[in-house]
Amino acid sequence: MASPLGGFLCPPGYSGPRGLRAIARESSAVAEAARLVRRTAGDRIAGRRTPYATLTPVRSVDPVVLVPGFMAGDSSLLLMSRYLRRLGYRTYRSTMHANVGCTQAASYALERRIEAIAIKRDRKVTVVGHSLGGLLARTIAGRRPDLVEAIVTMGSPILAPGAIHSVLAFDLALVIALRRAGLGTMMGEDCTSGDCARLSWEQARGPVHSSVAFTSIFSRRDGVIDWRGCLDPAARTVEVRTSHLGMAVDPVVFDVVAATLQANRERRAAREVTRARLSAVPAASAG
């Protein structure tokens, strides 16, 4: 079937995964979820043998917003949220029941959500986005570096969002058909191949301020999108062996996200120490 996405969203050199073999790779999401079940069970057993005083993580005030992928809602990242909370991070939902609306409207709604959290916590926010959620995170990071501390994208084809498998193209066409039939505020043609789509993509590729740390997680086994579209020059890229869908449940990906958050925390702490030392120099000179 012809893709409902505009040709400009799939630049030369990119192409979506094809055939049954590619989409069959997504079945490994079951095994990846099973890895998480085994990991969780192992952690519980280890927890019973650990003194209670050492079980409680150091509570972080760092806010982390999790943004789901296309056709998914906040519940798709619930397990990741629980994992990060066990490590002491303060996680927040995007408030998306299903990420199927106009990307322009979604990005501004998410921006307002992030702004409210930043004001409430009096600090910048880290945004972790899966697939389309990562494109939204990338957009807001470029538009509002005053709100965003860092972003982590998982399987987000920022360089070629139109390079997708025909199965996903069919799902997208269905969403457009429902919009045409007057059902809800879903994506329409303008959001996928018109000016709205072009503007969304341009914003998602905008410059990222040097103060915003950017990590892009990708997998060559991705059966939904062209993994090369995740190799954003502005990002630190990390490769995993995970399916596209499995990135939301694979403990290997969870560990990469957690390690990235910790590195960003240490980066900010070092920056604050340097700033404090610099501010102390004039005071010492004046004395």
Image (cartoon, helix red, strand yellow):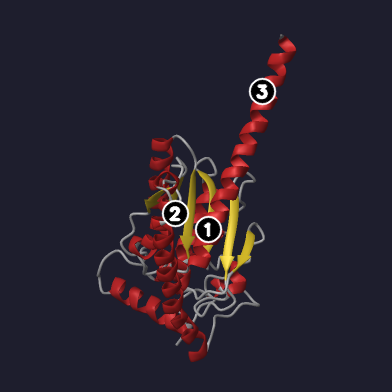
Q: Position of residue 31 (x, y in %)?
A: 45, 78
Q: Is residue 9 above or below residue 235?
A: below
Q: Quadrant of the N terminus?
A: bottom left
Query: Which of 192/80 is in front?
Result: 80
- State the residue position of label 2: 84
Element type where label 2 sits in the image: helix
How many neighbours does mark 2 have within 10 angstroms: few (below 14), some (14-19), or many (20 or more)?
some
Q: Is residue 21 above or below residue 216?
A: below
Element type where label 1 sits in the image: helix
| Cβ–Cβ under 8 Å for marks 2 and 3 | no
Residue at point 42% right, 73% down?
33
| Cβ–Cβ under 8 Å for marks 2 and 1 | yes
| Cβ–Cβ under 8 Å for marks 1 and 3 | no
78 horizontally vs 287: left or right? left
Residue that sits furthest to the right in the current view: 285
Q: Position of residue 143 (x, y in %)?
A: 53, 48
How many neighbours does mark 1 have within 10 angstroms: few (below 14), some (14-19), or many (20 or more)?
many
Residue 31 visible at all: yes
Which tag, 2 or 3, sits closer to the chain's start?
2
Element type where label 3 sits in the image: helix
- State the residue position of label 1: 257
Q: Quadrant of the C terminus?
A: top right
Disc 3 marks a residue whose amino acid type is Ser
Residue at point 63% right, 63% down?
237
- State the residue position of label 3: 279
Query: How many numbered marks have been drawn onto this rendered protein structure?
Result: 3
